[in-house]
């Protein structure tokens, strides 16, 4: 997409509207929803930037010097994304990592809303205390239940292939929003000077292969044999394939994925003896990231099958997760097939 002549900035909202114009049948519902998610991202970003200060002024549950309640950041993020999504009027229900059950919006326009949203409002939140990047992940589906009725959990148990849009926000050294509607992946960097997300990474394509592997090696002893063998493969010397590779692990899925997406690499959170089904959640962590990965030329699986094909059986279901550059994914699948 071209910026206007002499004015090189394309804001997120302009981009969304331009995209909508390319689809004459679109009524603007999804655009409105994405716009509201962008607003919540800015609010949460501001709060995260102040997190260190908030920590000094008071802990969660205490009252700070302004006499306000200090909320935990993940609760704050959940509240604001929830409110923004509700305000769009396009969504009838939300599933969030922060809520055991789905939240339905039963009043006014929302009850007729065509969409449901799954989200992890603050992924990697334990990193906040130590000033390390965190993220928000979201995923949008069309509802299955009839408009006007109350949505229910079956609206959320759709395979990832049915996602209409998915994205994440990374609150890092700069803040970025990356999303897809199934027509490629685009990234927007928040310009704090004008308070706008501006197109900075158009049509992201992840390299076919890379040199980074990301896995919590502290759990090595508990990994399946195929994963152990793959890690050893990554560490072997082979100038032809530029090995040994580099190990990078932040412990925040959004940050680890974002780096690998841009540079080429693989992220793995396998099943372990302690977490036999893996740790990451299918509907609001793995599916949106898998959708983005595939749209950017990468791949995502549970080690044997494509992540997006898995039909969820419960809201907070965990799955093993492998995501990254295609050639690296093929290689790890080879090890898993051989050694299990
Ligand atoms: P959270 O949703 O409770 O923050 O947990 C998810 C996070 C991911 O961001 C990250 O990839 C993973 O947990 C790290 O787990 P571990 O510390 O076991 O390596
Ligand atoms: Mg999470």
Image: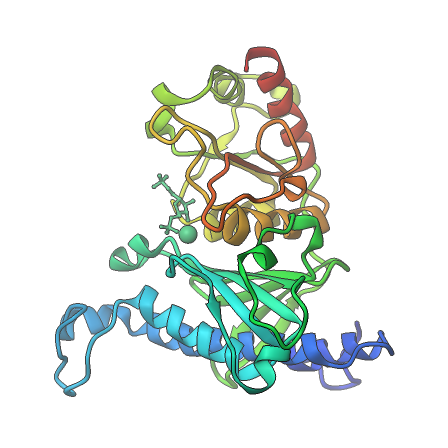
Residue under the image location 33 percent in, 64 percent down? 74
Q: Considering only vertical position in the picture, is 27 above or below 78?
A: below
Tell me where residue 107 appears, x and y as whole percent: 52, 84
Residue under the image location 59 percent in, 17 percent down? 335
Q: Is residue 274 visible?
A: yes
Q: Considering only vertical position in the picture, is 273 above or below 320?
A: above
Q: Considering only vertical position in the picture, is 113 above or below 236?
A: below
Q: Considering only vertical position in the picture, is 172 above or below 85?
A: above
Tell me where residue 67 appears, x and y as whole percent: 14, 87
Quadrant in which the C terminus appears:
top right
Q: Is residue 11 visible?
A: no
Find residue 99 and report its image quarter. Answer: bottom left
Tell me where residue 34 appears, x and y as whole percent: 61, 74
Along the line of sight, which residue is nearer the eye, 269 or 51? Answer: 269
Find residue 43 and report its image quarter. Answer: bottom left
Q: On the rendered structure, is 3 left or right of 310?
A: right
> How many numbered badges does the structure rendering display?
0
Residue under the image location 77 percent in, 60 percent down? 183
Quadrant in which the N terminus appears:
bottom right
* Residue that extends furthest to the right in the rendered view of this protein: 24
* Residue that extends furthest to the top in the rendered view of this protein: 338
Tell me where residue 186 appears, x and y as whole percent: 67, 63
Find residue 20 and report its image quarter. Answer: bottom right
């Amino acid at each position: 997409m071209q910026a206007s002549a002499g004015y090189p900035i394309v804001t997120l909202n302009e981009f969304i509207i331009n995209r909508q114009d390319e689809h004459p049948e679109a009524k603007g519902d999804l655009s409105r929803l994405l716009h509201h998610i962008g607003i919540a991202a800015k609010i949460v970003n501001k709060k995260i930037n102040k997190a260190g200060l908030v920590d000094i002024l008071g802990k969660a549950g205490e009252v700070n010097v302004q006499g306000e309640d200090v909320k935990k950041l993940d609760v704050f993020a959940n509240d604001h994304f929830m409110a923004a999504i509700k305000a769009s009027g396009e969504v009838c229900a939300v599933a969030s990592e922060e809520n055991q059950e789905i939240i339905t919006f039963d009043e006014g326009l929302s009850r007729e809303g065509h969409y449901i949203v799954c989200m992890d409002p603050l992924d990697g939140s334990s990193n906040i205390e130590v000033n390390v990047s965190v993220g928000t992940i979201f995923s949008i589906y069309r509802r299955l239940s009839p408009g006007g009725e109350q949505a229910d959990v079956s609206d959320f148990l759709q395979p990832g292939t049915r996602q209409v849009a998915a994205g994440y926000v990374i609150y890092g050294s700069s803040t970025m929003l990356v999303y897809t509607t199934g027509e490629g992946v685009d990234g927007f960097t928040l310009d704090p000077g004008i308070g706008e997300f501006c197109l900075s990474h158009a049509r992201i394509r992840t390299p076919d292969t890379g040199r980074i592997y990301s896995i919590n090696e502290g759990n090595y002893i508990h990994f399946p044999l195929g994963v152990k063998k793959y890690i050893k493969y990554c560490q072997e010397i082979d100038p032809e394939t530029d090995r040994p590779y580099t190990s990078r692990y932040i412990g925040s899925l959004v940050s680890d994925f974002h780096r690998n997406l841009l540079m080429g690499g693989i992220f793995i959170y396998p099943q372990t003896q302690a977490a036999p089904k893996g740790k990451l959640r299918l509907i609001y962590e793995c599916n949106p990231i898998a959708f983005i990965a595939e749209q950017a030329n990468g791949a995502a699986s549970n080690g044997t099958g494509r992540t997006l094909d898995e039909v969820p059986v419960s809201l907070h279901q965990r799955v093993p997760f492998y995501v990254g550059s295609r050639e690296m994914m093929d290689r790890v699948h080879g090890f898993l097939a051989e050694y299990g």
